[in-house]
Image (cartoon, rainbow, N blue to C red):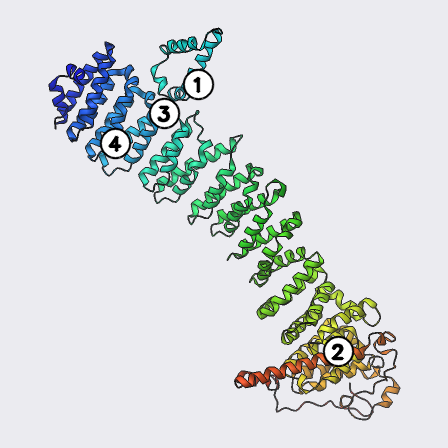
């Protein structure tokens, strides 16, 4: 301290603490001259003493004016040192940096001004303090005082200029390497030197190496954590400052910012949703530049950035989502193999974006999805089939149809490529796939069925599927009503119609819920009679009396079809077992003929008029061979209310049978009067032509009829039991009472008697 006071006039020291700026400035100029003289004389010890005095008595003083004078004088001392300032920076820069956090805004302002002047003198020599300067500038960029902000921005621009001076900054990166290289050169020329000799040589060489080489080692590894810590700051001024520095450092050829991109990538994406358009634009520009570098880089660690992109792809901000999905798209194209372990996460980000409200996002997401599907990864190479299935299963619950469709496509792809692995996770996805059958979209339901069909190639899984399907139909009546036909028809196409119907029949035969079994059988019967997909089954059933395969199918369906009288009658008409159909009709009792029965009968009568039953209508032209068909049809006619539309339809059809179709013997047996008032006399049970001749007895219709009667008796008991339990608890509601009333079509006038056909003498009008 005394050494410094000996060279510093008292007036100078006094003026440095004056409240007037001009006096402090003049005093600083005198400090500059004093330091310059000391440096010229090579008296660096006194220079250090002066700097220590300025630091201790002024920059660290509790008086604001002292601190201001100290900062100005330190900058002046640096100017006085000129080329020799680098070796004194460790005494000059720290007190200036400490002043950046001073409570007095004017002190902070003078600190910016002082460091600005210091930087202009030493240029790249102060890079050793880059992290500290960066941290200080980051804080000052959001300073509450506008003047301090302006001063910080000026200093920031100067520091950026210094950093981008290629020669200076390249020197900072390679200074240590160069120093070591020179040492190794000495050793090469002094092979015989000892370790002590080598050290002496290095120390001697030090005299020829600029002193700043000790300081100019910029560590990007130490800087990145500081940058990463600041990236989450929301202040717009700080964000602008950070983006600016990222861009500057990335432009320096010797700094590999791309290698550290994962450390601050999330922060850049976070800025894309900033309220300031300028910040968003700067962040987008920086990201675009990095993406361009990634495309041209031979080696990029895509994996570390994948998690960040996946998270940002779900951002509520549209621009952030678009940028993230664009990056993912490029990553999948450029580094597909490297991303194998991240496929599930990437897929989880892509699938929701496929249904994004923004068209651009949807397009990029679909393209990325197709790229991902084209990569045939191997489970042995970290490809996690279970994780992909989990994502697809989760997306089946998405509110967006397009996403659910693509999720099903993924399950289908995995089944085709990695069937064994997928089946090990079947328990995890099966229930979800079954629930998807209730999806409001027909396209989704069809795709679900495709997946189910693919799973059900194995007999065990086929049985599992049908059992669960029936179970779901039982629990969800609306599913059977709205989707039942679609599901059954599609499964018949995919898994063989006969196989599906046989399995369903086996399950329904032992169904304990008789009401559900009846409804299910009626639905299956209607599908059987009307669907083009089941035409082969219908053709096979038509040959039941002459073809063993048809007979076997007939018997297989018969057991479960017994749950519904109308289904059995329809099956008999289809199989041309007309005599048995007539016997079934004759076996019906009063309890069987209710509203539901009449509704089903009405549907059957209308179906008889469709092309499917054209063969049956043509058989009416040969009553000699198909008299049991006539009896069955007349039996149905007798069950129908005369005023119903179905009665008129069937009566008109029977009336259309021409009289010439009866032979003379049959006409002689007919009593006089209207043909419609009698039932033709049938041949006996030994007739070999009716119902297929000798094959008739092979089907053992007596056993079949007994089976039908027993099942119907169970239904009657079940109905009575249900009504009894209902009457014990409460009386029947009005709706139920109305249901028990006979069905009368609204369009029929009950006061108009049915028309009678006119007869000509000696001839029946058919």
Dot 1 and dot 3 residues touching (CB under 8 Å): no
| 3D distance between C-alphas at marks 3 and 4 | 21 Å
At which x and y percent is residue 588? 72, 84
Which residue carries the number 4 mark?
100
| 3D distance between C-alphas at marks 2 and 4 | 99 Å
At which x and y percent is residue 600? 66, 78
Q: Nearer the viewer, mark 2 or mark 3?
A: 2
Can residue 630 be seen in the rendering of this structure? Answer: yes
Can residue 608 be seen in the rendering of this structure? Answer: no
Q: Earlier in the sequence, mark 4 or mark 1?
A: 4
Q: Earlier in the sequence, mark 2 or mark 4?
A: 4
Instruction: Place residue 494 in its image quadrant.
Output: bottom right
At which x and y percent is residue 749? 61, 88
| 3D distance between C-alphas at marks 1 and 3 | 19 Å
In the picture, measured across the screen, residue 748 lies left or right of residue 550, that is left
Which label is found at residue 177?
A: 1
Q: Nearer the viewer, mark 3 or mark 4?
A: 4
Instruction: Place residue 203 in its image quadrant.
Output: top left
Q: Earlier in the sequence, mark 2 or mark 3?
A: 3
| 3D distance between C-alphas at marks 4 and 1 | 33 Å
Which residue carries the number 3 mark?
163
Q: Dot 3, how many residues are within 10 Å of its Cα: few (below 14), some (14-19), or many (20+)?
A: many
Give the residue drawn at x 76%, y 80%: 706
* Quarter of the C terminus within the rendering: bottom right
Q: Earlier in the sequence, mark 1 or mark 3?
A: 3
Find numbered disc 4 in the image and state the secondary structure of the residue it sits on.
Answer: helix
Which residue carries the number 2 mark?
707
């Amino acid at each position: 301290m005394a050494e410094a006071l000996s060279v510093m006039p008292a007036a100078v020291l006094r003026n440095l603490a004056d409240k007037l700026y001009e006096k402090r400035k003049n005093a600083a100029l005198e400090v500059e001259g004093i330091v310059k003289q000391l440096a010229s004389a090579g008296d660096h010890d006194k220079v250090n003493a002066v700097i220590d005095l300025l630091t201790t008595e002024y920059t660290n003083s509790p008086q604001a004016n002292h601190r201001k004078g100290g900062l100005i004088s330190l900058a002046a001392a640096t100017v006085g040192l000129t080329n020799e300032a680098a070796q004194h920076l460790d005494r000059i820069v720290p007190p200036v940096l400490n002043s950046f956090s001073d409570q007095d805004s004017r002190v902070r302002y003078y600190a910016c001004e002082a460091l600005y002047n210091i930087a202009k003198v030493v240029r790249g020599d102060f890079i050793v303090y880059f992290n500290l300067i960066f941290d200080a500038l980051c804080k000052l960029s959001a300073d509450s005082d506008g003047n301090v902000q302006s001063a910080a921005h000026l200093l920031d621009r100067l520091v950026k200029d210094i950093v981008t001076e290629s020669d200076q900054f390249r020197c900072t990166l390679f200074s240590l390497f160069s120093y070591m290289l020179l040492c190794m050169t000495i050793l090469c020329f002094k092979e015989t030197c000892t370790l002590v000799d080598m050290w002496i040589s290095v120390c001697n060489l030090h005299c020829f190496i600029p002193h700043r080489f000790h300081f100019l080692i910029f560590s990007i590894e130490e800087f990145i954590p500081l940058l990463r810590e600041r990236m989450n700051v929301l202040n717009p001024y700080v964000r602008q400052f950070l983006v600016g520095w990222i861009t500057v450092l990335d432009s320096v050829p010797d700094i590999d910012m791309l290698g550290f991109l994962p450390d601050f990538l999330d922060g850049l994406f976070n800025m894309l949703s900033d309220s300031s358009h300028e910040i968003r634009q700067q962040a987008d520009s920086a990201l675009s530049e990095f993406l361009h570098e990634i495309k041209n880089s031979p080696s990029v660690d895509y994996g570390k950035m994948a998690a960040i992109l996946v998270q940002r792809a779900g951002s509520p901000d549209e621009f952030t989502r678009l940028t993230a999905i664009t990056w993912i798209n490029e990553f999948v194209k450029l580094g597909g193999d490297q991303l194998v372990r991240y496929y599930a996460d990437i897929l989880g980000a892509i699938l929701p974006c496929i249904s994004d409200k923004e068209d651009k996002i949807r397009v990029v997401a679909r393209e990325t999805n197709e790229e991902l599907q084209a990569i045939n990864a191997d489970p042995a190479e970290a490809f996690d089939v279970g994780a992909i299935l989990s994502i697809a299963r989760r997306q089946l619950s998405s509110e967006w149809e397009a996403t659910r469709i693509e999720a099903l496509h993924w399950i289908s792809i995995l089944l085709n490529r990695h069937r064994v692995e997928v089946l090990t996770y079947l328990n995890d996805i099966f229930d979800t796939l079954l629930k998807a059958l209730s999806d409001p979209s027909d396209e989704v339901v069809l795709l679900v069925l495709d997946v189910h069909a693919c799973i059900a190639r194995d007999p065990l899984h086929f049985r599992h599927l049908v059992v669960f399907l029936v179970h779901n139909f039982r629990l969800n009546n609306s599913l059977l009503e709205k989707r039942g036909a679609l599901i059954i028809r599609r499964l018949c196409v995919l898994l063989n119609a006969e196989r599906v119907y046989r399995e369903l029949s086996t399950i329904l035969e032992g169904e304990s819920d008789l009401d559900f079994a009846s409804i299910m059988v009626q639905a299956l019967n209607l599908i059987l009679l009307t669907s083009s997909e089941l035409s082969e089954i219908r053709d096979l059933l038509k040959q039941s009396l002459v073809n063993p395969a048809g007979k076997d199918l007939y018997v297989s369906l018969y057991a479960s079809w017994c749950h519904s009288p109308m289904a059995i009658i329809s099956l008999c008409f289809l199989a041309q077992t007309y005599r048995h159909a007539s016997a079934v009709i004759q076996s019906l009792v009063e309890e069987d003929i209710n509203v539901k029965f009449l509704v089903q009968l009405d549907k059957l009568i209308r179906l008889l008029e469709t092309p499917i039953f054209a063969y049956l209508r043509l058989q009416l032209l040969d009553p000699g061979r198909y008299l049991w068909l006539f009896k069955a049809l007349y039996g149905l006619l007798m069950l129908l209310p005369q005023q119903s539309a179905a009665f008129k339809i069937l009566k008109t059809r029977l009336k259309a049978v021409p009289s010439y179709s009866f032979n003379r013997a049959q006409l002689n047996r007919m009593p006089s009067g209207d043909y419609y008032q009698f039932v033709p006399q049938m041949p006996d049970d030994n007739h070999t032509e009716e119902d297929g001749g000798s094959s008739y007895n092979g089907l053992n219709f007596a056993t079949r009829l007994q089976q039908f009667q027993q099942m119907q008796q169970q239904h009657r008991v079940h109905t009575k039991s249900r009504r009894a339990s209902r009457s014990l608890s409460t009386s029947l509601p009005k709706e139920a009472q109305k249901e028990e009333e006979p069905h009368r079509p609204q369009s029929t006038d009950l006061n108009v008697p049915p028309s009678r056909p006119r007869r000509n003498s000696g001839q029946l009008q058919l």
